[in-house]
Image: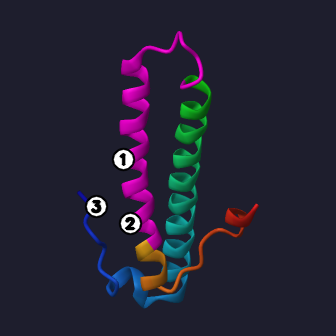
Amino acid sequence: PMPPRLPIRGPLFELPARRAALSRMLRVDHAGEHGAVRIYRGQLAVLSRLSSTPPAVLAALRDMEAHERVHLRAFEEELPRRRIRPTVLLGV
């Protein structure tokens, strides 16, 4: 399930300082979700090659990575909707 969408208009977007603050918060949250997906993918890449990794651990990591992908997708949809640029570090 997708997280609920925040209203595009409202008191947080009425003042430029509030819009700037909200933009920074959403940008940081988006970067965090992007990082979380990458971390789980990295863990899966390494641990899936080890015969000693219990299947339950791999299943749990896949499940957590899937949840983070849902969160990331929500931010990837929300940022353009709010005309907020993603972090410049995504291209690094």
Q: Residue drawn at (25%, 66%), measured in percent from left and top?
A: 4
Camera-side residue: 42 or 20?
42
| Above or below for 44 versus 31 | above
**Residue annotated with mark 3:** 3
Report the residue that reaches farthest toward the top.
52
Say what secondary structure mark 3 lies in: loop
Three-letter amino acid code at the position of disc 2: Ala
Q: Which mark is residue 67?
A: 1
Q: Residue drawn at (72%, 66%), measured in percent from left and top?
A: 91
Camera-side residue: 1 or 23?
1
Three-letter amino acid code at the position of disc 1: His
Stretch in magenta: 48-76
Left or right of 31? Residue 91 is right
Q: Marks 1 and 3, Cα distance to the nearest angstrom? A: 11 Å
**Residue annotated with mark 2:** 74
Q: Residue drawn at (72%, 63%), measured in percent from left and top?
A: 89
Say what secondary structure mark 2 lies in: helix
Report the residue that reaches farthest toward the right.
92
